[in-house]
Amino acid sequence: MRYEAPDSIEAAVSLLAGEAGKARILAGGTDLLVQLRLGHVEPDLVVDIKRIAATQSITEEAGGYRIGAAVSGAVLGEHDGVRALWPGVVEAVELIGSTQIQGRASIGGNLCNASPAADSVPALVAAGAVATIVGPDGRRDLPVEDVAGGPGKTVLAAAELVESILLPARPAGSGDAYLRFIPRTEMDIAVVGAGVNLTLDGAGKCSAARVALGAVAERVLLVEAAAAALIGTPVDDAALSRLAEAASAACRPIDDKRGTKDFRTRVAGVLAQRAARIALRRAGRG
Amino acid sequence: MTAIAVAATINGEATSFLCEAEETLLDALRDRLGLTGAKEGCGTGDCGACSVVLDGRLVCSCLVLGAEAEGREVETIEGMALGDHLHPLQQKFLDHAALQCGVCTPGFLVAAKALLDQNPSPTEEEVRFGLAGNLCRCTGYDKIVRAVMDAAESMRDGR
């Protein structure tokens, strides 16, 4: 295995493009080093992207924030601007692991590790975040919900990498939230995760919503039917019940040691509804 | 395979070492530099026994490649005592018998110091949450939490 730590994204792409064997990208390393240790991956080349300025910075852009792919949970959590604009995204990122893991684990790594149970991803999907991907043919933008192809797999080509993620601007009267179910109080992997992002108009009706679920399918799901249950309504109990039904209906989970299909399906609806209530409060209602 | 030359600041001293690309910072500290305070418990970032501070952030050194330390600052348990004077956390761990086998202790001390550096007056809940990434299979944690709370108090009092 070779280790390279280029200081430009172009150099990183060249290294990846020039590697005949297997290459892996190293951001925070909290997944990759475990995979190396367990022998799940045996790369010929590891490209550490943390010395590339664009992967390490948080910058304002068009009323939102562009977050470098290697920005750690600890750094993101200390950013007052992102906390204020997208509290649901920050709370999701902060659920990942311990203080030690937060010091390293990155938003881009959580996305590209492509775990269906990744905590930050439902919140990013609900937020309408867009990943900026760089490869031999230049840059392209891809909605975060389209990055994962299945467990542990992304749709990125061999020499492509995520440089940054754009959290967009949002209108007044908006709120977002992320909740997960785990059998402990912390330091666990989501049995189910639910992210909700909504906007209320001046009359208190929901004018826009996005709902995303984690750990209930082979990848994080954007559930348009669940959002549709809220849009155009005053987000009352009846609408929230329809949201829960739509969320549960979208689930196609597996049984595993963390939860059964039936449990995950039911809990997805409950969590989506609870996250929506928190998002509603953050949007300025009650 | 060619070893990688790494220059880093470790416990305030300019240090250089050679390591293989796949070698972790934990292995480099222990096997190349003889800094055996950080322990390998799990090797997968779950137990915190290998905790060190890297550029001001608490991390598991088993989840860092040695080569990543190039140009960085690393603080380990070996840098915690001031000469012959134990750090207040170390002394309080002794006073409260907050260790039994001792394998987790360096990690707990490094993590507790990072916690108190950021929050000098933590509640018990904040201590327990802040140290959730450190596992101890002997003490049941109560004595550790008491030692950290007591150390925080004495550090605030400047004792």
Image (spheres, coloured by chain):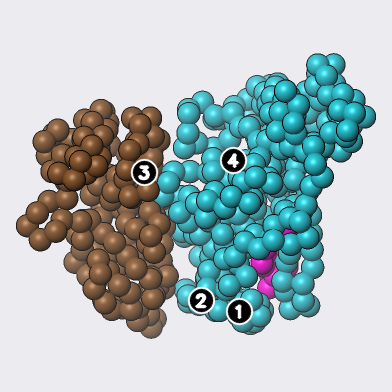
Q: Which residue is mark 4?
A: A91
Q: Amino acid at mark 4?
A: Glu
Q: Can residue B74 be found in the magenta stretch?
A: no
The span from disc 4 to disc 1 (Cα, nearest Å) is: 30 Å
Q: Which residue is mark 1?
A: A8
**Chain A hue?**
cyan
Label 4 packing within 10 angstroms: few (<14), some (14-19), many (20+): many
Q: Are marks 3 and 2 in contact (CB under 8 Å)?
A: no
Mark 4, secondary structure of its residue: helix
The numbered mark 4 sits on a residue in which chain? A
Q: Is residue A101 visible?
A: yes
Tag in front: 3 or 4: 3
Q: Amino acid at mark 2?
A: Ala
Q: Name the mark on residue A83.
A: none
Q: Which residue is mark 2?
A: A5
- How many marks the image carries: the answer is 4
The span from disc 4 to disc 2 (Cα, nearest Å) is: 30 Å
**Residue B63 on image: x %, y %:** 41, 57
Magenta segment boundaries in residue numbering: A157-166
- Reading the chain from its start, which is encountered first: label 4 or label 1? 1
**Residue A274 on image: x %, y %:** 69, 24
Label 1 packing within 10 angstroms: few (<14), some (14-19), many (20+): some
The span from disc 2 to disc 1 (Cα, nearest Å) is: 9 Å
